[in-house]
Amino acid sequence: MTCYRHPDREAFVRCQRCERFICPACQVEASVGFLCPDDAGGTPKQVSRQRSRALSLGRPQVTLTLIAINVVAWLVEISPVGQLFQAYFQLLPVNVPIAPWQLITGGFLHDPSSPLHILFNMYSLYIFGQVLEPMLGRARFLALYLISLFAGSLAVIWFGASMIPTVGASGAIFGLMGAYFVVLRSLGQQSSQLLGLIAINLVFTFININTISWQAHIGGLVGGAAVAFIYAKTRNASQNGMQKLALISLVAVLVLFAVLRIPQLNLY
């Protein structure tokens, strides 16, 4: 008995689908046993590369990168230069006219005196990121995250106290929750559990209103839901241009609201 691909080699294993004999060099391991290269879609080396590539694409790389940025930022916060770092990058509404980058960077900082703050946020980011990133794709997921973060910061400068600093990724994470809810609804899937989770988090937010920024949470939730709504209505490949235009329009509206608020912040 010889291999059907290598007549000069002895073979004692049959392909589980076509039952042809295959030598060790042609045996592709599968859940049903060994397959020949024809039935497996390639040689063992080719299939191995394909699986590695698929695993890499399935890994939430943007989510892990965002987590890494947050963790590095927190480590700098607890370092000797932490106070200066916070003063420059935390979101302090009254400083936004001269430091507009704080509308984004504030979402990557956390309370240096509370490891639980960053641990809880990063855990939540990973939970929702590993679901949404493969579903939306890396670029769309990153856009969702940043727009949600920006929307949360925008709500802070409009409805929060101008002299109270705000830090944390929770606005963006609420955006992910809002987006996931919209995605589930658009796909016709069960969303009651997620709705309950959002409600519980909102109740917890308003119970601790003196220590938690409800503005960032609500703003992020609305921003994330708006982005997901755009994705849901332009999911076809032929609508990519329309989707980009809608996202740009949404960002332009948010920036306009920020610009309108800046002169008022200068009054404080």
Image: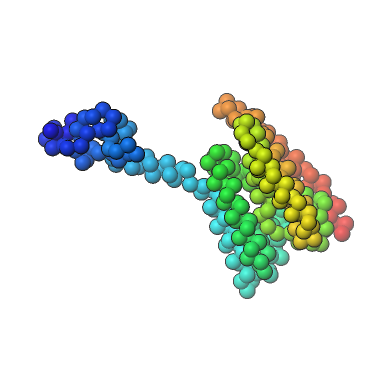
- 99 or 82, which is in the foreground? 82
Side (left or right) of 56 relative to 157: left
Colour convention of the picture = rainbow
User: Eyeballing the image, is 30 above or below 70?
Assistant: above
Please give left or right for residue 32 compared with residue 147 in the image.
left
Picture coordinates of residue 136 (x, y %)?
A: 57, 38
Closest to the observer, 11 or 68: 11
31 vs 150, left or right, is: left
In the rendered image, which quarter is residue 116 located in? bottom right
Name the outermost residue toward the bottom: 80
Residue farthest top in this picture: 238
Quadrant in the picture for the N terminus: top left
Q: Position of residue 198 (x, y in %)?
A: 70, 46
For the point 14% across and 33% down, the residue is 2
At x 65% / y 43%, what residue is drawn? 194
- Quadrant in the picture for residue 160: bottom right
* Quarter of the image with the C terminus in it: bottom right
| Left or right of residue 5, residue 41 in this image | right
The correct choice, above or below, for 71 with respect to 138 in the image is below
Q: Quadrant of residue 167?
A: bottom right
* One can see residue 86 in this view: yes
The image shows residue 75 at horizontal and vertical percentages of 59, 66
Q: Residue at x 65, y 50 (%)?
A: 173
